[in-house]
Amino acid sequence: MSMDRTSAQYDIEKKSLLVAYVLWFFLGYVGAHRLYLGRPVSGLIMLALSAVTLVLSFVSFGVLGFLWVVVGLWWLIDALLIPGIAAGRNMRIADRVFGQR
């Protein structure tokens, strides 16, 4: 594979910090940014936790609404973790794409 084609392949597959932060801001409480960055297990756990919290909040008339604090803290902490997660993901993509030569 030529270097131009390899570089183009990397550019297509690499993960954008801007996209990750937009997903985090608007859909972070359901783990969309984690799914985008290649962390499907933690993304699905975050989605399930949000769904369970939502259901429990309705069923308990808000008594169990404190569970949103857990989701909110995870969401805030992820704001700090996104650059490292994206860099790691992009490094794995680069290793795979540029290692094909």
Image: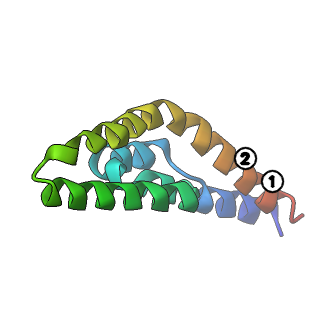
Q: Are marks 1 and 2 in contact (CB under 8 Å)?
A: yes
Structural crowding at the residue carrying mark 1, measured as other residues with C-alpha within 10 Å and reported as few (<14), some (14–19) or many (≥20): few
Position of 5 with respect to 71 (left or right) is right
Q: Quadrant of residue 100?
A: bottom right
Q: Depth check: give the residue in front, 50 or 26.
A: 50
Give coordinates of residue 31: x percent, y percent.
Answer: 41, 54
Q: Residue at x 72, y 47 (%)?
A: 91
Q: Which mark is residue 95?
A: 1
Give coordinates of residue 23: x percent, y percent.
Answer: 36, 51
Q: Of the residues shown, which amino acid type is indicated by label 2?
A: Met
Q: Which mark is residue 36?
A: none
Q: Of the residues shown, which amino acid type is indicated by label 1?
A: Asp
Q: Residue at x 47, y 58 (%)?
A: 45
Give coordinates of residue 70: x percent, y percent.
Answer: 36, 39
Where the N terminus falls, by quadrant? Answer: bottom right
Secondary structure type for disc 2: helix
Q: Is residue 58 above or below residue 18?
A: below
* Distance between mark 1 and mark 2 Cα atoms: 6 Å
Where the C terminus falls, by quadrant? Answer: bottom right
Q: Residue at x 47, y 62 (%)?
A: 44
How many numbered marks are there? 2
Check the image and name the residue furthest to the bottom: 1
Question: Label 2, on which residue?
Answer: 91
Position of 15 with respect to 28 (left or right) is right
